[in-house]
Amino acid sequence: MPEAQAVNRFFSSIANRYDLANRVMSGGMDILWRRRLARMVASESPHDILDLATGSGDVVFTLARRVPTAKTIQGMDFCVPMLDEARSKLKKTGIHHVQISFEQADCHQLPLPDASVDAITIAFGLRNLEDRAQGLREMARVLRPGGCLFVLEFTQPYKWMRPFYYFYLSKIIPVVSGWITGDREAYRYLSDSVSAFPDRNQLSNEIRNAGFSTVSATPLTASIVAIHRAQLSS
Ligand SMILES: C[S@@+](CC[C@H](N)C(=O)[O-])C[C@H]1O[C@@H](n2cnc3c(N)ncnc32)[C@H](O)[C@@H]1O
């Protein structure tokens, strides 16, 4: 599992180039993946949503635009420069119909009461937690009974895709991200953490072990990423 301080340093160092790096490296697919996530969240009609490892806030803004029932959306992250990006983007969005806040918090110990939110999203964040099991238990704790967790994360691609994908991940990404962020080594972390992350079945088991009852996984884009939907029993 990655070491928390190193993860925080990594995201601090790339915060002002994070969005650009995402767009270029995913060919814009990250936008479509977040929209799909928001569609799945919207189908649960939640009022109070928590977005963890919110980073520069793109999931929060996508949810605000695409989940009509949302009343409050809280974005939490432990990296201050990433939150600074999110807050400065918030000022430019013109979103007023939903109450949005960004707060510094560690996913391993959330500053929220038990059973206080209707839905939780975490996009490209779970992979970065030092103690994934503890993070998932915290998510189960703060969700209301019957509430849903949505995890958007890289996963094991379909077999035919793997040679291309792993070549792209290990050879192309460090070079391209080096151009964008000026730090080629830092982005090796991305490739390593994606390769080391559990596949869909393993992750589903980890989520069940944290106390969720129903877990299903939807692979997207040749299974480069997947959205796990997990529900707490009511
Ligand atoms: C790849 S970014 C994802 C940002 C955003 N969710 C998105 O879709 O673009 C991962 C984020 O996880 C945050 N993070 C990693 N470990 C964390 C932890 N233990 N607690 C809170 N945030 C964490 C990092 O600071 C970073 O902003």
Image (cartoon, grey):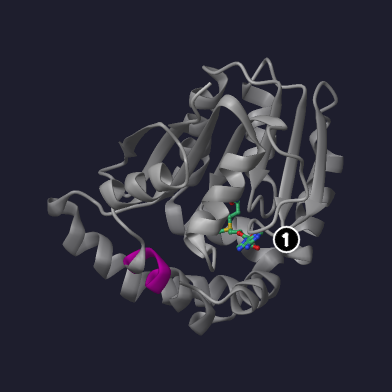
Residue at x 32% of width, y 50% of height: 224
193 falls in the magenta region: yes
Identify the residue at the far left of this view.
160
146 falls in the magenta region: no
Q: Is residue 55 above or below residue 130?
A: above
Q: Which residues are magenta?
A: 191-195
**Can you give x and y, in whole percent of width and height, for residue 231 in the image?**
47, 29
**Can you give x and y, in whole percent of width and height, for residue 34 in the image?**
52, 38
For residue 134, side relative to residue 204 (left or right):
right
Q: Quadrant of residue 122?
A: top right
Please tell me in which quarter of the rendered image ligand 1 is found: bottom right
Residue type at tag 1? Met
Residue hosting label 1: 82
For residue 13, side relative to residue 172 (left or right):
right
Which secondary structure dominates the residues rendered in magenta? helix
Instruction: Tell me the crowding category of disc 1: few under 14, some 14 to 19, or many 20 or more residues within 10 angstroms, Cα based.
Output: many
**Can you give x and y, in whole percent of width and height, for residue 212 in the image?**
45, 36
Q: How many marks?
A: 1
For residue 11, side relative to residue 89 (left or right):
left
Q: Quadrant of residue 13?
A: bottom right
**Can you give x and y, in whole percent of width and height, for residue 159 in the image?**
14, 53
Residue at x 83% of width, y 49% of height: 87
Element at badge 1?
A: helix
Confirm if mark 1 falls within 8 A of ligand 1. Answer: yes
For residue 36, side relative to residue 221 (left or right):
right
